[in-house]
Image (tube, rainbow, N blue to C red):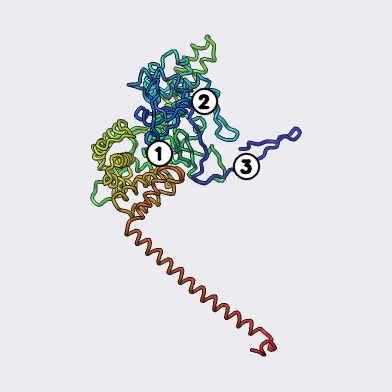
């Protein structure tokens, strides 16, 4: 890209832009929210204007609604730009406030009514965004049958919350809903737990990649995007973040991305066939065999998504064509549309036949080592367990995990391989649930069992993997396994600092744990012994070097004497 130009006469000469090198850990973008809303569980735990937690400052409720809380009069005054319009409607629902996304939609609408569409946020020197510049996916929302119940439910709740008179017309409302849905961030506390949702104009420029090269953190309400790699020249078009958790099968992850962001992910991670072999895999039941059996997906999710995208585009194209044509040609267009839809069914069958994706042509799964084939009952049992696991995951509150639910689900996954995506996910949730409940022995057990799986699904430079290692090291230190805990903390420190920054509370806690572990008597003696040996080696090296210097001086003197004339040697 060239972004500078100079004009000489009638010709335009383009100057290349000045390169901006970026080191890993550098902040490449910061942004404040266009609108935000805390989750209902955290409304009284954080200041609604600056997100300072209750444990750091005393909070006072709003005098009107007594639902949102503030840490100071300045924050109360700053929040009036969005809260004065919602205060009355929130007061009516103070005992049963709507969910955070509905309140976020209401705040977006109120801000737009107050001239928020004129608000511009820059993301680079010559690039900026307004709210209307965000993608709304209007056509996808209009034609997506799967999302229609959810859209209707959310908009009905919004109407009950702020009233019909505060809403724009249906077309504008669906556009606002789409922009908010697709560009919504979950902002997090210092422990990287979600506490609410927000819309950031500048930060919405980043595309998805399931192996990202950037990481998103939050300082209060401000979002910070840091680079995880060194870049010779910053190009925001080549900077990626992850929209969803990568511990999942590629089909399930792509389905989530399509439902939330209306695109089919084609990144290397989603297309990695070697990785896909482990995502749905079970252990071989032959004794002493260490192989796995890779099971194909029960449904062709990717093909279904492609067909949905194709059908949605065709429906939208036909709708636009019908709007352009006059009344006299509408009947003819409908007849052609019927013929086209008949051809579409044929094309779908052809696509399946060409791509060889018919289910009856799939070979029976076999063990990668000994060739053992599971029975149809085993396969049915596996997919029933996967369905149960998905149901449990949907019911779990990620911020308030019930350790009993996690353990009940984990008991059913005994025949899953260690790198099975569903087992790695449940083990990770069990690990986090044990930490939240201070069950450090259980946390250490599940963390060590899941270490290989976490390394498999996350890249080495991932701050999420570093956070897992940090918690695992903390568990070891709390259980007085200081030496192993220190090794794990040393590994976690590099990319935890890169992704979160040196001043993040988790990084500071890591340094405190390192100091605590270093106070162990055995480690102190070992460190003292190592330092003593280094001193002895250094002193011995100095003795040798000083002796070598003395010999060098003697030889230099003798060399001078031998080259001197006999007259100069007469007095010797």
**Picture residue at 67% right of the left edge, 84% below the top:** 564
Q: Sequence-wise, which precedes: disc 3 or disc 2?
A: 3
Could you tell me residue 391's position as x and y percent? 29, 31
Q: Position of residue 35 (x, y in %)?
A: 46, 26
Q: Is residue 341 above or below residue 356?
A: above
The one nearer the camera, 217 or 311, is 217
Q: CA distance from mark 3 to mark 2?
A: 29 Å
Disc 1 element: loop
Residue topped by disc 2: 131
Residue neighbourhood size for the residue with mark 3, other residues' Cα within 10 Å, grouped as few (<14), some (14–19), many (≥20): few
Q: Nearer the N terminus, badge 1 or badge 3?
A: 3
Residue drawn at x 40%, y 66% as measured from the top left: 532
The CA span between labels 1 and 3 is: 36 Å
Mark 1 lies on residue: 190
Q: Which residue, given by chain and number where applicable, does mark 3 sit on?
A: 18
Cα–Cα span, label 1 and label 2: 28 Å
Whether the residues at callouts 1 and 2 have beta carbons within 8 Å, the answer is: no
* Residue at 45% from the left image edge and 24% from the top image edge: 178
């Amino acid at each position: 890209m060239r972004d500078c130009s100079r004009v000489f006469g009638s010709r335009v000469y383009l100057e290349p832009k000045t390169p901006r090198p970026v080191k890993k850990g550098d902040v490449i973008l910061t942004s404040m929210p266009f609108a935000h809303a805390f989750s209902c569980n955290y409304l009284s735990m954080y200041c609604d204007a600056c997100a300072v937690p209750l444990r750091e400052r005393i909070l006072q409720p709003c005098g009107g609604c007594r639902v949102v809380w503030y840490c100071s009069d300045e924050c109360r005054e700053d929040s009036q730009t969005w809260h004065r319009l919602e205060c009355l409607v929130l007061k009516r629902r103070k005992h049963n406030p709507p969910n955070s996304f509905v309140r976020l939609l209401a705040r977006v609408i109120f801000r737009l009514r107050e001239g928020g569409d004129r608000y511009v946020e820059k993301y680079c020197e010559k690039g900026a965004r307004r709210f209307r510049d965000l993608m709304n996916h209007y056509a996808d929302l209009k034609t997506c049958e799967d999302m229609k119940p959810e859209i209707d439910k959310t908009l009905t709740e919004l109407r009950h919350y702020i009233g019909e008179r505060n809403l724009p017309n249906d077309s504008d409302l669906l556009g606002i809903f789409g922009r908010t849905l697709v560009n919504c961030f979950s902002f997090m506390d210092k422990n990287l737990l979600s506490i609410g949702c927000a819309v950031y104009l500048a930060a919405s420029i980043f595309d998805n990649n399931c192996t990202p090269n950037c990481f998103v953190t939050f300082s209060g309400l401000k979002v910070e995007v840091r680079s995880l790699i060194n870049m010779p020249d910053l190009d925001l078009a080549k900077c990626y973040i992850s929209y969803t958790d990568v511990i999942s099968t590629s089909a399930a992850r792509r389905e989530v991305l399509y439902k939330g962001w209306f695109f089919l992910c084609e990144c290397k991670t989603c297309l990695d066939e070697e990785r896909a072999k482990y995502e749905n895999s079970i252990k071989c039941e032959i004794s002493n065999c260490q192989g796995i059996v890779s099971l194909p997906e029960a449904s062709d999710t990717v093909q279904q998504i492609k067909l949905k995208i194709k059908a949605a585009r065709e429906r939208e194209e036909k709708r636009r064509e019908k709007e352009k044509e006059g009344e006299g040609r509408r009947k003819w267009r409908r007849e052609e549309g019927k013929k086209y839809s008949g051809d579409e069914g044929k094309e779908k069958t052809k696509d399946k036949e060409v791509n060889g994706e018919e289910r009856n042509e799939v070979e029976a799964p076999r063990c990668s080592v000994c060739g053992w084939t599971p029975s149809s009952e085993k396969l049915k049992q596996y997919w029933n367990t996967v369905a149960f696991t998905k149901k449990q995951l949907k019911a779990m509150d990620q911020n308030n995990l019930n350790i009993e639910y996690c353990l009940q689900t984990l008991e059913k996954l005994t025949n899953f391989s260690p790198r099975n995506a569903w087992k790695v996910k449940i083990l990770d949730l069990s690990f986090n649930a044990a930490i939240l409940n201070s069950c450090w022995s259980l946390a250490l057990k599940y963390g060590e069992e899941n270490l290989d799986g976490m390394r498999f699904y996350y890249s080495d430079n991932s701050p999420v993997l570093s956070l897992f290692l940090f918690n695992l090291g903390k568990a070891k230190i709390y259980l007085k396994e200081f030496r192993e805990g220190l090794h794990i903390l040393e590994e976690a420190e590099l990319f935890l600092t890169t992704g979160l920054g040196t001043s993040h509370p988790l990084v500071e806690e890591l340094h405190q744990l390192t100091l605590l572990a270093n106070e162990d008597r055995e480690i102190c003696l070992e460190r003292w012994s190592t330092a003593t040996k280094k001193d002895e080696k250094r002193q011995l090296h100095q003795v040798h070097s000083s002796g070598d210097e003395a010999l060098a001086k003697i030889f230099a003197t003798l060399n001078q004497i031998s080259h001197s004339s006999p007259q100069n040697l007469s007095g010797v």
